[in-house]
Image (spheres, rainbow, N blue to C red):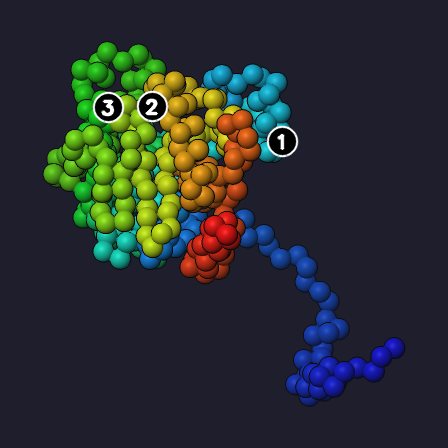
Amino acid sequence: MQKPSKLLRVLLAALALSGMSTLLTAPAYAEAPMAKTQVPGYYRIMVGSIEVTALLDGVMQLDKSLLQHAEDKKLNRALDRMFVGNPKMTTAVNAYLINTGKNLVLVDAGAAGLFGPTLGNLVQNLKAAGYSPEQVDRIVITHLHADHVGGINDQAGKPIFPNASVSVSQAENDFWLSKDIAAKASPAMQGFFQMAQASAAPYQASGQWKPIPGDGTGEIVPGITAVNASGHTPGHRIYIVESQGQKLVITGDMLHAHAIQFSNPGVAIQFDADQKKAIAMRRDILKRVANEKSLMSGAHLPFPGIGHVVPEGKGSYRWVPVEFNPTPSAAVANTAAAHANHAH
Ligand SMILES: [Zn+2]
């Protein structure tokens, strides 16, 4: 046996002197009570000089039968390969809080109480992330489905963001908030219209509801741009955060089932208002994001829903999620380094 090191001998002597050596012979208490709670649902990353905080509203279970143009055998194989539940696919609901230094912009707001008890944690996580709802001055919603707009109000339907204007594209506004279109919609769709209209109402009443005029694209605030991505809904928009040559493309509901829609972007979901258009939009954006090697996020990708897209050939892609990093700026350094390496 080796002689104990000098440090160890000093430590043992110190323990003996302080009487703490009794600890060494005391029985071990291994049965600690389980914590049974999770860490707060936020994740931070820098995009150039802009700080982006992913906020988790919660998770929901989507049945695989909602997916369209997916051969059952291939779908089962894709779900198994990614260890995703079958037939119920656990699906995150994410939103993104963007601090440009001048504006605090929330992209999507979760569901509050509209989609059941497993969602509605957005405000709690926003506060855990060090912000308050009063500080948010702009809210931009990708589209008016309740899991994106419901969370601008609390469970009782009272507005949560007193100082924010709320924007969607004019096309989205005119579709979901139209009493005429709602009246002609199928019974299955009625709920979607009701929830969109109830969510908008308090902000319309206070003058805070401000659709993006024209085609609903262009600069929202310096550093954030809206881009047309209709198909999932008539006025669906994605938002691009850009600073110092770095880019994050916030894609809203561009895809819902990561286990199959990256490898096969031709798979659609029943909620797509225009499936053909939604599929074309998904192919187009995946191609662009993969080519640019920019960061991408999705409202229904596993939290924090931020990562890169890698082309795998034949119109197929692979998702590479970001890694947890204790300092937000370092995460970008990795991305920048990856870009620089690729350029050589
Ligand atoms: Zn959604």
**Rendered residue at 27%/45% (across/down):** 224
Q: Amino acid at mark 3?
A: Trp
Q: Residue at x 58, y 52 (%)?
A: 34
74 up-or-down from 37: above or below: above
Q: Quick check: 54 above or below 83?
A: below
Secondary element at image label 1: helix
| Residue 193 position (above or below residue 44) | above
Give the percent coordinates (x, y) of residue 250: 36, 40
Residue position for label 2:
231
- Name the kind of residue labelled 1 in the image: Arg
- The image's mark for residue 202 is none
* Residue positioned most to the front: 344
Q: Please name the residue that numbered disc 3 is placed on.
A: 176
Q: Pointer 1: what residue?
A: 81
Ligand 1: does it lie within 8 Å of the C-beta at label 1?
no
Percent position (x, y) of residue 8?
A: 73, 81
Label 1 Cα crowd, 10 Å radius (few <14 / some 14-19 / many 20+): few
Disc 2 residue type (three-letter): Gly
